[in-house]
Amino acid sequence: MADEMVELAQRFINSYDVAGIPQVEVNGRTSWKVMHALTRALQYELGITELSDGFGPTTLSALRSRFGACVDGSTRHGNVYRIAQSGLYCKGYDGGGIDASYNDRVVDSVIGIKSDMGVGGAFPGGGLEPKVFKALLTMDPYVRVGDGTEAVRGIQRWLNGRYVGRREFFVCPCDGHFSRDVQKALVFALQYEIGMGDDTANGRFGPGTQDGVRSQALLEAGSADGARQFVRLFQAAMRFNGWDVAFDGRYSQALAHTVAEFQRFARLLPAHGGGDFRTWASLLVSTGDPTRPGTACDGITEITEKRAQALRAAGYTTVGRYLTNAAVPNARNKKIQPGELATITAGGLSVFPIYQTNGGDREYFNPHQGARDALAALEAARGHGFLPGTTLYFAVDYDAVDEEVTSLVIPRFRALAARMHAYGSEYRIGVYAPRNTCSRLARAGLTTASFVSDMSTGYSGNLGFPLPGNWAFDQITTLTVGTGAGYIEIDKNIASGRDPGQNRFAPRGPDTLLDVDFDRARQNDLTTDLIRYIEDNGHGSIGRLRGPHECATKVVDMDGLITGLARSLRMRKALIQAAVFWEYQADRTDPGVDLLVATYFTWREQHEAWERHPVGDPPVPPLVIREDSSTGVAQIFARTAIEARNHCVAAGVVPGAPLDPDDWHVRRDVWTRLRNDDDHNVSTVPLVHLHSAARVGVTTDRLRYSDADIIAVLARYNGTGAEAQNYGRRALDLHRVFEKYNAAQRS
């Protein structure tokens, strides 16, 4: 929402005609661009010649040198006052007008923001200390935001209040959320408590900090009062990682119990409930203690008999291997090799499969790629023989920031999940990614397990994020195992036990009978043949919403989905194409009928609401009641879709529980999706065909249907009786047109 005082702040920024101070959009909304511009304006007023976005040591030093301990009413520098007032407004506080004065309203707001930061005790009064000024010109919030908690915010304020006087400690956010800046503040605090000086403390959990933690006595129930600050920091780390513990500096039995739960969750065994080095490490850095033993690993190197023996001797029981090679020029041959899975299992190991054809470029993450990956991964997993129910780990091998997870990664996985569901959900979807990406995808219901790339400790998606709740493998370090012929480099993983890997396989060789993608270079020829058939047989566009050219284009545009459906279900794609092409023409009366059905469902919803709260007269039912209609791309009734799906669930083709076609709520939901979701509608066509085949007794291999079989199945798509038989014969003619091109491309 636009704020008129932020607009004034933006106009003040734009009043500078100085190289290095950019003009900003006057829109009344705070942003990093605005804060960076204010920072540059302050640097200019301090006489700094090389302006930058960063409020670093040079700016801090110049601020102290020019104005002493703080900027306040005695500073008497109009533009510095305006910068402070602008920063307050951008932070949501009263700036007292942008009038170049340090008035009482400014003083009150500065006292308020310092209280929110937790530094009011360290920096009393209404002056702006350099570190507070620095914090003012950031986008960091100092009030609880969104689903942030007051428990976490209380610790953030405590950290600021206790350590802000140390040279390298700067005010961290107080929004109730764990983040990389808060994690860094916590490590600084730990360094100070183990005795590091300002010239040594750096906010990184490096060797010196690790040695300092190791040198401390084990924190456990009844730890002495002298360890109170260490206990507080330990409790802070537990809370930041999502564990509900007190923040009182006491290592109680309740704390020990919760710590033991965390240790079991993170596989820090035995779970003794004490605050030892490995527990500290797992709370503070994504790898935890990389020297701890792991039972799983992954790598790009073929597992030979000798390597399998070396891995087993080193304590590994599960190995991650790649389903395919990367789809880039000169890609390394890292995929599972012929006979390798048998060698691995003979060596006493199990396997979990990783799918990565790229995964490291932002451009790769889009719905179209997700849809393509679904079929490629499905067929690769089938080819290697992974059994149904296996989790396939799809790679997100880059540091996606939170906005990119929202705009790029989730849409790709949503498309991937939709296609995998359409193909029968034979395999489960997992992800290989940093912590935040793993957690976001799990919360969105798009993955069942996570393979966490925790070895990338500097990734923003790992810093300040707890281990995902559905983690299966935690990648923590690269090392080598074995010697001679058994030598191999691997990434060591901790296994949670959620995914034991696979040790039985049923390989399926390439099926040359399956259809392939349509060659778009033949689109004009296909369209010409379809138009000729329509015209020659008197099936012109009279009474139709769409002509044959538009319908042919629709079929070709959906070829990726149709091909995947046909291949995954071992069905001729012409069966799907013929139905979609014919039905997409649609009768001119169909939209009106759909409207009647939509009106009926709206009335049912209103009437149900009235029954719960019967105020006034009940809603009047529509004059014409239609409870269902053939709708969407392929003109499918909701009841038909439900019964077809129920048949396929019972046959093990698709997962799930049966639906009740007599429940209007179920029909409404199915009908609405059929009407509005083209992919879902077309994905239902082969399910209807499978149900139809069972109804009419066609049990032949679907790739070898006779003409009579095709007529019988396609006729049932339209119902029963003479008209349905005519429909089946007409659909056979269309099947032949499509099959002419499909067969040529198969061969």
Image (cartoon, rainbow, N blue to C red):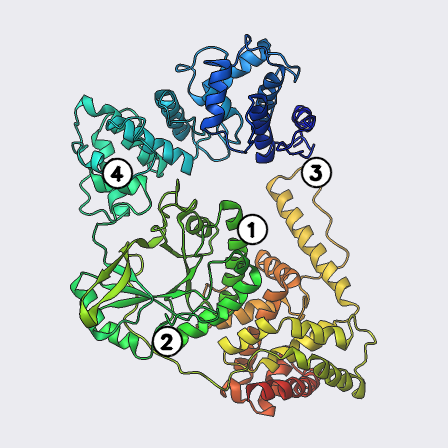
Identify the element where label 2 is drawn. Answer: helix
The quadrant in which residue 738 appears is: bottom right
Q: Nearer the viewer, residue 47 or 358?
A: 47
Above or below, 52 against 664 in this view is: above
Q: CA distance from mark 1 to mark 4?
A: 34 Å
Q: Nearer the viewer, residue 626 or 273?
A: 273
N-terminal label among 4 and 2: 4
Foreground label between 4 and 2: 4
Which residue is at the far front?
Answer: 49
Identify the element where label 1 is drawn. Answer: helix
The quadrant in which residue 380 appears is: bottom left
Instruction: Tell me the kind of residue under disc 4.
Output: Trp
Instruction: Tell me the kind of residue under disc 3.
Output: Gly
Above or below, 44 against 725 in this view is: above
The quadrant in which residue 164 appears is: top left
Q: CA distance from mark 2 to mark 3?
A: 65 Å
The residue wearing badge 3 is 616
N-terminal label among 3 and 1: 1
Q: CA distance from mark 4 to mark 3?
A: 63 Å
Q: CA distance from mark 3 to mark 1?
A: 46 Å
The residue wearing badge 1 is 407
Instruction: Tell me the kind of residue under disc 1.
Output: Ser
Foreground label between 3 and 1: 1
